[in-house]
Amino acid sequence: MNALSKDELDKQMKSCEPYVKELHGSAGFRMDIGVKSGAITFGNRKGRIERLDRNSKSEMRKEIRNVFIVEAENMEEAMETAKKHPALRLAEGEDLVLSVEIHEIHTYKVR
Protein backbone atom coordinates (compact mmCIF):
# COMPACT_ATOMS: atom_id res chain seq x y z
CA MET A 1 0.00 0.00 0.00
CA ASN A 2 2.97 2.31 0.44
CA ALA A 3 3.41 2.27 -3.36
CA LEU A 4 0.02 3.93 -3.88
CA SER A 5 -0.35 7.67 -4.42
CA LYS A 6 -2.41 9.61 -1.89
CA ASP A 7 -5.35 9.73 -4.33
CA GLU A 8 -5.13 5.98 -4.98
CA LEU A 9 -4.94 5.26 -1.26
CA ASP A 10 -7.91 7.55 -0.55
CA LYS A 11 -9.90 5.71 -3.25
CA GLN A 12 -8.96 2.33 -1.71
CA MET A 13 -9.94 3.47 1.78
CA LYS A 14 -13.28 4.81 0.48
CA SER A 15 -14.06 1.48 -1.19
CA CYS A 16 -13.36 -0.28 2.14
CA GLU A 17 -15.92 1.73 4.12
CA PRO A 18 -18.98 -0.53 3.63
CA TYR A 19 -16.96 -3.63 4.52
CA VAL A 20 -15.40 -1.99 7.59
CA LYS A 21 -18.87 -0.86 8.72
CA GLU A 22 -20.11 -4.46 8.39
CA LEU A 23 -17.07 -5.78 10.29
CA HIS A 24 -17.57 -3.21 13.05
CA GLY A 25 -21.22 -4.28 13.31
CA SER A 26 -20.32 -7.95 13.88
CA ALA A 27 -21.55 -9.38 17.19
CA GLY A 28 -18.07 -10.23 18.45
CA PHE A 29 -16.33 -7.04 17.27
CA ARG A 30 -14.52 -5.28 20.12
CA MET A 31 -11.77 -3.01 18.78
CA ASP A 32 -10.13 -1.66 15.60
CA ILE A 33 -6.63 -0.21 15.87
CA GLY A 34 -5.03 1.38 12.81
CA VAL A 35 -1.25 1.56 12.90
CA LYS A 36 1.14 3.65 10.82
CA SER A 37 3.65 2.03 8.54
CA GLY A 38 7.33 2.13 9.34
CA ALA A 39 7.49 0.03 12.49
CA ILE A 40 10.78 -0.44 14.29
CA THR A 41 11.54 -4.14 14.56
CA PHE A 42 13.75 -5.75 17.20
CA GLY A 43 14.90 -9.31 17.56
CA ASN A 44 17.20 -11.47 19.65
CA ARG A 45 20.32 -12.29 17.67
CA LYS A 46 22.78 -14.57 19.45
CA GLY A 47 21.74 -13.30 22.88
CA ARG A 48 21.73 -9.61 21.93
CA ILE A 49 18.62 -7.54 21.34
CA GLU A 50 19.15 -5.72 18.06
CA ARG A 51 17.18 -3.51 15.74
CA LEU A 52 16.46 -5.49 12.58
CA ASP A 53 16.87 -4.14 9.08
CA ARG A 54 13.42 -4.50 7.51
CA ASN A 55 14.99 -4.21 4.05
CA SER A 56 17.16 -7.27 4.61
CA LYS A 57 16.15 -10.31 2.56
CA SER A 58 16.49 -12.49 5.65
CA GLU A 59 14.02 -10.49 7.75
CA MET A 60 10.24 -10.65 7.59
CA ARG A 61 8.75 -8.17 5.14
CA LYS A 62 5.15 -8.25 6.35
CA GLU A 63 3.76 -5.08 7.75
CA ILE A 64 0.83 -4.89 10.16
CA ARG A 65 -1.56 -2.06 9.28
CA ASN A 66 -4.56 -2.88 11.46
CA VAL A 67 -5.34 -4.93 14.52
CA PHE A 68 -8.93 -6.04 15.04
CA ILE A 69 -10.00 -7.63 18.28
CA VAL A 70 -13.08 -9.82 18.15
CA GLU A 71 -14.64 -12.10 20.71
CA ALA A 72 -15.49 -15.53 19.38
CA GLU A 73 -16.44 -18.91 20.81
CA ASN A 74 -13.89 -20.68 18.60
CA MET A 75 -11.55 -20.19 15.63
CA GLU A 76 -14.30 -21.00 13.11
CA GLU A 77 -16.40 -18.14 14.44
CA ALA A 78 -13.34 -15.85 14.41
CA MET A 79 -12.68 -16.83 10.77
CA GLU A 80 -16.24 -15.94 9.77
CA THR A 81 -15.80 -12.48 11.28
CA ALA A 82 -12.35 -12.08 9.70
CA LYS A 83 -13.78 -12.89 6.27
CA LYS A 84 -15.64 -9.57 6.44
CA HIS A 85 -12.36 -7.63 6.32
CA PRO A 86 -12.02 -5.53 3.14
CA ALA A 87 -8.57 -6.98 2.39
CA LEU A 88 -10.30 -10.27 1.64
CA ARG A 89 -13.36 -8.91 -0.13
CA LEU A 90 -11.99 -6.34 -2.57
CA ALA A 91 -10.18 -7.42 -5.73
CA GLU A 92 -7.51 -4.81 -4.98
CA GLY A 93 -6.64 -6.73 -1.81
CA GLU A 94 -5.22 -9.51 -3.93
CA ASP A 95 -3.34 -7.08 -6.19
CA LEU A 96 -1.79 -5.43 -3.12
CA VAL A 97 -1.01 -8.83 -1.53
CA LEU A 98 -3.10 -8.02 1.55
CA SER A 99 -3.94 -10.75 4.03
CA VAL A 100 -5.60 -11.30 7.39
CA GLU A 101 -4.16 -13.40 10.21
CA ILE A 102 -6.07 -14.76 13.16
CA HIS A 103 -4.35 -15.19 16.50
CA GLU A 104 -5.93 -16.45 19.69
CA ILE A 105 -5.35 -14.02 22.54
CA HIS A 106 -4.13 -15.78 25.65
CA THR A 107 -3.61 -12.68 27.80
CA TYR A 108 -5.48 -9.40 27.76
CA LYS A 109 -5.07 -6.70 30.37
CA VAL A 110 -6.46 -3.18 30.40
CA ARG A 111 -5.22 -0.49 32.74
Image (cartoon, grey):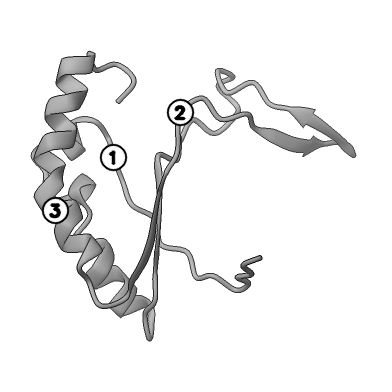
- Considering depth in this image, is 76 or 73 the residue closer to the camera? 73
Image quadrant occupied by the C terminus? bottom right
Q: Secondary structure at mark 1?
A: loop
Where in the figure is residue 60, as x and y percent of width and height? 54, 34
- Give left or right: position of 101 versus 12: right
The answer to which of marks 3 and 1 sits earlier in the sequence is 3
Where in the figure is residue 7, as x and y percent of width and height? 16, 17
Q: In the picture shown, does residue 12 fall above or below 74?
A: above
Residue identifier under label 2: 37
Residue drawn at point x = 24 percent, y = 17 percent: 4
- Considering depth in this image, is 106 or 109 the residue closer to the camera? 109
The answer, for residue 83, to whether it is visible in the render is no
Q: Quadrant of residue 35?
A: top left
Q: Residues within 10 Å of mark 2 (few under 14, many from 20)?
A: few
Where in the figure is residue 52, as x and y percent of width and height? 68, 26
Q: In the picture shown, does residue 10 fall above or below 45?
A: above
Disc 3 residue type (three-letter): Tyr
The answer, for residue 86, to whether it is visible in the render is yes
Picture disc at residue 19: 3
Disc 1 residue type (three-letter): Leu
Image quadrant occupied by the N terminus? top left
Residue identifier under label 1: 98
Q: In the picture shown, does residue 57 fall above or below 31?
A: above
The answer to which of marks 1 and 2 sits earlier in the sequence is 2
- Considering depth in this image, is 57 or 104 the residue closer to the camera? 104
Disc 2 residue type (three-letter): Ser
Q: Secondary structure at mark 2?
A: loop
Picture disc at residue 28: none
